[in-house]
Image: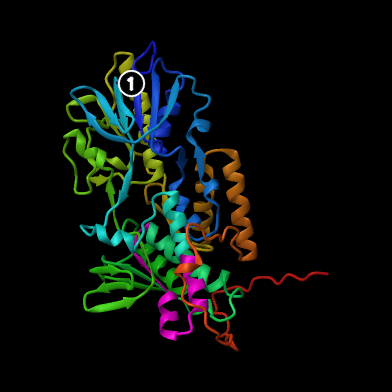
Amino acid sequence: MARIASTGPHVVVVGAGFAGLQVARKLKRAQVHVTVVDHYNHHLFQPLLYQVATATISPGDIGSPIRRVLRGNLNTTVLLAEAKAVDTSRKVVECDVGDLSYDTLVLATGATHSYFGHPEWAEFAPGLKTIDDATEIRRRLLVAFEAAEREPDPEQQREWLTFVIIGGGPTGTELAGAVAFLAHVDLVREYRRIDTRQARILLVEALPRVLTAYPEKLSEHARRDLEKLGVEVRTGSMVTGVDAEGVVMGQERIRARTVLWGAGVAASPLARTLGAELDRAGRVKVTPQLTVPGHDDIYVVGDLASVVQNGRPVPGVAPAAMQMGRHTARNIRRQLEGRAPEPFHYVDKGSFAVIGRNHAVGTTLQERLKLSGFIAWFGWLFIHILYLVGFRNRLAVLLDWGFSYFTHKRSVRLITGGSAAELPELKHREPSKAQPPLPPFVEKAPEVRVH
């Protein structure tokens, strides 16, 4: 059993996401030894993963090595390992490299994909939670256009140029808008045998409207923006089957070679090892102090915690996770001083969902102020850059976004992790002789002349 030598109590933080990283940072000068455990070596800014998936920014722009972020914390050790279970009776975290004992434990392992009882769909419809997920989605998107370029059969070509995104929440709407912009604007002049503007992007949502967490007016605004971008929005439609050739919705089959998942999330399975009461998504029903009932030495924060405030669940967003992390660090300090931990109170500073270039919706001041269009898009841009870890990351993302915004070009359209072997056989076919005019919502990219 491993125990880090220290003159103070041992605080183990499992997960270096928004919540876990805040706990470690705020305990920098506390009289404790902190061990941060994560099975990745980097902190990931998940809200921008879809930008990596659609070839706007590089993975390195939204990831920072955990050791670098915490290099100034002299009381902190970073352990690259995967936590498998928690044994509350022995006060140890069982990891793949051995047991790690704790005096205080903070679980911040977040959430993963939920396929609503159909794990077999994961092979055909990847979700978006990690950098690996994002680069795999990017590969599938770009390979689809390459395959369509080589495919002589019009019917098969239409299948390659059909993209189905399942789930009308923030992830699904952001992906749909970005894929539409990629196909209808960015790639227009780069292929000779296909017209990428003919790509069909279909967003499917089982509930009556998209972005149900937002006010109905903003939800309808988002739907209109998506449709202006060329996205076909299907609400009230439940997917009942997913395979390599498309999706099934009731009696209807939509043939598509690229299906993306943004419909549901489930809490990390580590929560089940606590023996605590869980909600339907597998999150731990914590006390107002964010501790596990009956275990004042175990805190659960971020997407792993089920917190209800004023009759409403605290949303699983980055600002909420960061507030939980900071509050937990304060409570740990209070316990060290012999004082009781205080209840957590979430301050809603607003949330945004981007639909496309210059298009977003958002709320601030606890939903009293509702924003849409360019103002919401600019607010979303500012907040996301502000929360990025490290000056270099902020500068790199700002430059990449600026390049994409003014030139309509993607800077990181790399196909990785695959080969041409999966593409259809190349057969001679004449390039299309004419392409239809640009749709009205598309601005022409400036032509570059060499003098």
**427 lies above or below 137:** below
Give the colour scheme shown: rainbow
Give the residue number, with chain letter if any, for mark 1: 2
> Toward the viewer: 398 or 239?
239
Q: Tell me if I can see residue 81 in this picture.
A: yes
Q: Quadrant of residue 237?
A: bottom left
Q: Name the main secondary structure of what is drawn in magenta.
A: helix
Q: Which type of secondary structure does the marked residue at label 1 adopt?
A: loop
> Amino acid type of disc 1?
Ala
Location of the C terminus (image quadrant): bottom right
Disc 1 crowd, CA 10 A, few/some/many (<14, 14-19, 20+): few
Q: Is residue 145 left or right of residue 232?
A: right
**Furthest residue in direction right, as rendered:** 451
Q: Which residues are magenta?
A: 141-170
**Residue 276 in the image, given as x and y percentages of width and height:** 17, 35
**442 lies above or below 88:** below
> Toward the viewer: 216 or 49?
49
**Residue 5 in the image, given as x and y percentages of width and height:** 39, 14
**Residue 345 in the image, given as x and y percentages of width and height:** 32, 35
**163 lies above or below 75:** below
446 in the magenta segment:
no
**Furthest residue in direction top, as rendered:** 7
Location of the N terminus (image quadrant): top left
Q: Quadrant of residue 292?
A: top left
144 in the magenta segment:
yes
Q: Residue at x 44, y 57 (%)?
A: 136
Q: Tell me if I can see residue 309 in this picture.
A: no
Q: Residue at x 50, y 72 (%)?
A: 145
Q: Is residue 187 left or right of residue 248?
A: right
Q: Residue at x 39, y 35 (%)?
A: 38
